[in-house]
Amino acid sequence: MPSKRNQMVPNEHFHKDWQRYVKTWFNQPARKERRRKARMAKASKISPRPMESLRPVVRCPTNRYNVKSRIGRGFTLEELKAAGLAKKYAQTIGISVDHRRRNKSVESLQYNVQRLKEYQSKLILFPIKANKPRKGDSTPEEIKKATQFVGTVSPVAKSGKRVKAMEVTDDLKKFKAFHSIRQARAVARLWGIRA
């Protein structure tokens, strides 16, 4: 199969018993079915725990995409600490942890801490020993109501805020966007050098 996107048009001259090297995908439907059955088996095995773990909301990297938010890999140790959770304990109650990620803004830290607290408030914790419930475990009535959650745990809410049109003032007309961006970059580059 030729490679996708803007490449040179392939014009191969096949030799060397090329039929041996042809890749086929006849196992695709069976593989799809096997994956579906494995998902169902996992769901019944871990029931009533949710199928997926809670993950943080992160900004996409680079200038091009950093306007968008998406689900990340795991919560930082700083976020867990702010929410009052230990790393090992968090992993046992369905929270993903990523020790490599760093918080670069207070806003992201606060938002993800809020997510963790919201998740904890909705969580139904089963006691390890039924006859010896510990502090923080759910009541028997709550446990009876527990149902398995399937899908992304608290997905990213799409903001439906419409931007209102504003009146164009003289200051806005005089504003030079490109020039101001260049100046901001120069200030950042020469920070500490320029007197």
Image: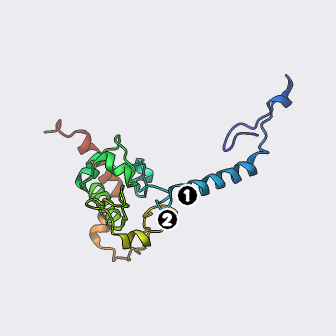
Q: Nearer the viewer, residue 82 or 43?
A: 43
Compared across the picture, whether 150 is left or right of 144 comes to right
Residue at disc 2, secondary structure:
loop
Q: Which residue is mark 1?
A: 43
Q: Is residue 183 above or below residue 110?
A: above
**Displayed quadrant of residue 128:** bottom left
Q: Residues within 10 Å of mark 2 (few under 14, many from 20)?
A: few
User: Disc 2 residue type?
Assistant: Gln
Residue at disc 1, secondary structure:
helix
Q: Which residue is mark 2?
A: 148
Measuring 68% from the left and 50% from the top, which residue is drawn there?
A: 34
Q: Nearer the viewer, residue 123 or 178?
A: 123
Q: Position of residue 98 (x, y in %)?
A: 37, 44
Q: Are marks 2 and 1 in contact (CB under 8 Å)?
A: yes
Cα–Cα gap, marks 2 and 1? 8 Å
Q: Residues within 10 Å of mark 1 (few under 14, many from 20)?
A: some
Q: Residue furthest front?
A: 131
Measuring 77% from the left and 43% from the top, which residue is drawn there?
A: 25
Any part of residue 76 in sight: no
Measuring 24% from the left and 50% from the top, which residue is drawn there?
A: 81
Q: Position of residue 88 (x, y in %)?
A: 33, 45
Q: How is the image coloured?
A: rainbow
Q: Position of residue 127 (x, y in %)?
A: 35, 59
Q: Is residue 74 above or below residue 15?
A: below
